[in-house]
């Protein structure tokens, strides 16, 4: 059984896709042990509660400095001893110590085809604003392992989504979620639960 902790900051639609995947059996052998939000008002916390999953908030605003927050956040993770940490719209930089400790055991969903529109400052709607401003015809989403860089870890899976001429950032964001994010994030978790994902020389290899 793969024990996962899901970290969220906002609406939690990707969390919902994971909850539904576990409930419907498209994600097998997986238990969502805990949901952690950095934002007390995140709707994702309500989604977790409604699904009967332990949901906690560890907010930087409630600690005197970053170090104290990082310590509290790591303690909250380590209490659960997860096999995998899933960043599902988590907009906080993880402590380097946690990343080192959980090497190749933290995954993130990013709403573009990395290496386009990623790195510092590219999150949420900003990613789609940048894609539209550049005039790309194809965008998409990426699931990758988290390393100490920003969106630089080994790529597990990507899915392309067409951009339309009349798209707004909001419309494009919704299409990327529906056609890519909500599919590939549960899919990757299921592959990891099945032991089908390994990293060799910084690249991901998937087995049948
Ligand atoms: C998603 O689009 C996710 O890809 C993005 O935030 C959104 C969260 O939505 N993540 C990033 O931009 C990370 N750099 P959700 O809370 O409804 O899942």
Image: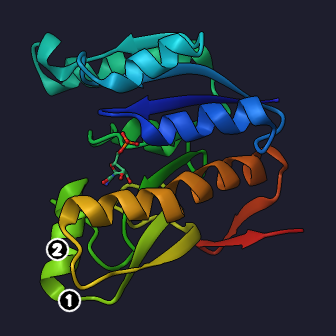
Residue 64 seen in the current view: yes
Left or right of 207? Residue 146 is left
Find residue 5 and report its horizontal and vertical position in percent. Answer: 56, 28
Judge whether 74 appears above or below 131 on screen: above
Q: Quarter of the image containing the N terminus?
A: top right
The structure residue drawn at horizontal position 50% and vertical position 35%, both measured from the top left corner, is: 15
The structure residue drawn at horizontal position 63% and vertical position 75%, both measured from the top left corner, is: 201
Find residue 83 and report its horizontal and vertical position in percent. Answer: 68, 33
Tag 1 near tag 2, CB within 8 Å: no
Instruction: Give residue 130's mark.
Output: 2
Residue 74 seen in the current view: no
Which element carries disc 1, helix, strand or loop? loop
The structure residue drawn at horizontal position 73% and vertical position 72%, both measured from the top left corner, is: 205
The structure residue drawn at horizontal position 74% and vertical position 29%, both measured from the top left corner, is: 23
Left or right of 194? Residue 5 is left
Q: Quadrant of residue 31?
A: top right
Left or right of 205? Residue 195 is right
């Amino acid at each position: 059984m793969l024990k996962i902790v899901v970290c969220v900051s906002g609406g939690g639609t990707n969390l919902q896709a994971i909850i539904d995947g576990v409930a419907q059996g498209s994600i097998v052998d997986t238990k969502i042990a805990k949901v952690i939000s950095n934002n007390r008002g995140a709707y994702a916390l309500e989604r977790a509660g409604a699904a009967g999953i332990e949901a906690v908030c560890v907010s930087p605003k409630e600690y005197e400095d970053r170090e104290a927050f990082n310590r509290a956040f790591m303690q909250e993770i380590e209490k659960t001893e997860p096999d995998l940490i899933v960043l599902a719209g988590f907009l906080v930089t993880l402590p380097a110590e946690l990343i080192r400790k959980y090497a190749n055991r933290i995954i993130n969903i990013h709403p573009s085809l990395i290496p386009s529109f990623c790195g510092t400052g590219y999150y949420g709607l900003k990613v789609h604003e940048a894609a539209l401003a550049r005039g790309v015809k194809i965008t998409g989403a990426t699931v990758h392992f988290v390393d100490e860089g920003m969106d630089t870890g080994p790529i597990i899976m990507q899915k392309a989504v067409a951009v339309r001429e009349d798209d707004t950032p909001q419309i494009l964001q919704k299409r990327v979620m529906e056609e890519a994010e909500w599919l590939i994030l549960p899919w990757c978790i299921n592959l990891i639960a099945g032991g089908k994902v390994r990293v060799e020389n910084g690249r991901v290899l998937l087995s049948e």
